[in-house]
Image: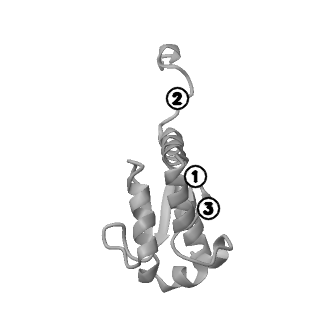
C-alpha cells in the first residue's frame, strides 16, 4: 500500500483523525498540542497519526487535501483544517457536535445489520 492509500485509509477508517507532530499525550509542537486538546474536549475517542514517526506521511500529507501545514484534522472523512480552525470551531460550538455526529455515524455503520427482524426469522428445517 502506498503512502497516499495509507493516508486515505486512516481518514476513511476513523470518524475523527488528527495528523500531528507527536501524540495527543506527548505533542511535539504547540499547534498540534492545542488541536489535540480541542479534540479531547469533545469527549470522544479519536485516532491520531504522528507524522514525525512516518517520514513518508510527513512528506506527502500536504498533497492529500492540498493543505500545507500540520496538524490536519479530519472529521467524517473531511478535512476541517488545522489548529486555528479547530479552535475556532470549538469556541463557536461547532466542533463538539461535528465530532459526536461523526463518531455516532461510524458506530452505526459498524453495528451488525439484521436482514430481517428477529420475530420474522423462519426456523431452518
In the figure, residue 105 lies in which quadrant?
top right
- Give the label, 2 or 3, closer to the camera: 3
Q: Which residue is at the front of the view, 21 or 15?
A: 21
The numbered mark at residue 76 is 1
- Residue of label 2: 114
Residue at position x 52%, y 82% in the image: 58
Q: Which comes before the other along the chain, label 2 or label 3?
A: 3
Query: Residue 79: x, y in percent?
Result: 61, 62
Q: Counting residues from the N terminus, which is met first, the one under dot 2 or under dot 1? A: 1
Q: Which residue ends up furthest to the left in the rendered image? A: 25
The structure residue drawn at horizontal position 64% and vertical position 73%, both measured from the top left corner, is 67
Q: Position of residue 3 (x, y in %)?
A: 57, 77
Say which residue appears at 55% left-offset and 54% top-offset.
Answer: 89
Secondary structure at numbered mark 2: loop
For mark 1, does the 10 Å Cα neighbourhood hold few (<14), some (14 to 19), or many (20 or more) residues?
many
Q: Using the image, tell me which numbered label, if any, was put on residue 79.
A: 3
Q: Quadrant of the N terminus?
A: bottom right
Nearest-to-viewer mark from 2 and 1: 1
Amino acid at each position: 500500500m502506498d503512502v497516499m492509500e495509507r493516508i486515505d485509509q486512516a481518514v476513511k477508517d476513523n470518524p475523527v483523525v488528527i495528523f500531528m507532530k507527536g501524540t495527543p499525550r506527548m505533542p511535539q509542537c504547540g499547534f498540534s498540542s492545542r488541536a489535540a486538546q480541542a479534540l479531547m474536549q469533545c469527549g470522544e475517542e479519536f485516532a491520531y497519526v504522528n507524522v514525525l514517526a512516518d517520514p513518508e506521511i510527513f512528506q506527502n500529507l500536504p498533497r492529500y487535501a492540498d493543505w500545507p501545514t500540520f496538524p490536519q484534522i479530519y472529521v467524517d472523512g473531511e478535512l476541517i483544517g488545522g489548529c486555528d480552525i479547530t479552535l475556532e470551531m470549538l469556541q463557536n460550538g461547532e466542533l463538539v457536535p461535528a465530532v459526536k455526529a461523526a463518531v455516532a455515524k461510524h458506530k452505526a455503520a459498524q453495528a451488525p445489520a439484521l436482514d430481517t427482524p428477529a420475530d420474522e426469522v423462519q426456523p431452518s428445517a
